[in-house]
Image (cartoon, rainbow, N blue to C red):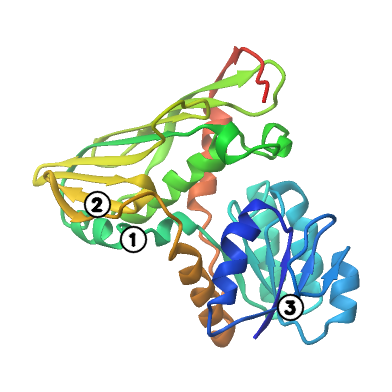
Amino acid sequence: MKIALVGIGKIALDQHVPAIATSPDWELAATVSRKGTVDGVPSFDSMDHMLDARSDVRVVSLCLPPVPRFEAAKTTIEAGRHVMLEKPPGATLSECHTLIGLARQHGVSLFATWHSREAAGVADAQAWLADKTLRKLTITWKEDVRRWHPGQDWIWQPGGMGVFDPGINALSIVTKILPDPIHVSSAVLEVPENCQTPIAAEIDFHHPAGAEVTASFDFLQQGEQIWTIKAETDEGVLILSDGGANLTIDGKDMLRSDAFSLTGEYPRLYAQMARLVESGRIDMDLTPMRLVADAFTLGRRMPVAPFVE
């Protein structure tokens, strides 16, 4: 199937383009971007121009920042094309629910992708925790924004989510592997004086069986980058590290890779999108985004030093 990629930035070039290129399901037939291009692929400067010119493109994958994504998705769905959304699927939950309604109305597939759920160790972690009694779960997600998001000023603007842009990856994993639902009970958000979104966050969650569930997010991590989820149960301790790529249970390596990598995550997302289009289904799990919205609603803001890239 022919697919268009919209928003040719770092994540599109690093992950989406290679995933499409190696997929048996897809042909990258067009791009839409104000600046970026992909060699050998026709490029357009607007969604309307692309949709008018390329009736053969059935599917559009949106890699735009969250705020402009809604209008692009709405235009695409109303044109009768299927839509794949980079995480988070929108700037607000209301936007996402509106897109679900539009997709149903126009009979197209819609996919809210959570790439971290496709990390190598996540499925095994979910299976192991399914029948365990959870006592404590700790999320530690700390990375250097200057290294991973250089020049991305939109992250600090309303709708950009700040540290929750990577933090939502952790929440997508936790809401996948835990058999019980959780919700935010309290949060502290550290917001730079010159930004609209947090640069760090500490969160407590309610667990229905009383387990202690916490998260620590930091966008100013120096040295070792940490993407770890530790689950302590009556039957043992599970640790997902490197963003879910590595899995240990009671200190024993169940799955171990040499380094953090997104290899495999995006190809699996595109394979799922192909299945959704073929079956006419919608996959829009908004649970991770709901937890972020809860944190913004309940979170106590603490002003901190201005952020200077």
Label 2 to label 3, Cα distance in Å? 38 Å
Under mark 2, the amino acid is Leu
To which residue does mark 3 refer?
Answer: 81
Front one among 217 and 106 = 217
**Mark 1 or 3, closer to the camera:** 1
Q: Amino acid at mark 1?
A: Ala
Residue 72 placement (x, y as % from top left): 79, 61
Q: Which sits earlier in the primary sequence, circle 1 or circle 3?
A: 3
Disc 3 secondary structure class: loop
Q: Quadrant of residue 17?
A: bottom right
Task: Label 1: state its secondary structure.
Answer: loop
Contact, CB < 8 Å: mark 2 with mark 1? yes
Q: Which residue is mark 1?
A: 120
Measured Cα–Cα span from mark 2 to mark 1:
8 Å
Location of the N terminus by quadrant is bottom right
Q: As shown in the figure, which amino acid type bears the numbered disc 3?
A: Arg
Q: How far is mark 1 from mark 3, CA to CA?
A: 31 Å
Q: Nearer the viewer, mark 2 or mark 3?
A: 2
**Rendered residue at 85%/73% (across/down):** 50
Above or below — where is 300 with respect to 283?
Answer: above
- In the picture, measured across the screen, residue 76 lies left or right of residue 177, that is right
- Of residue 81 and residue 120, the one placed in the foreground of this image is 120
- Residue placed under numbered mark 2 in the picture: 247
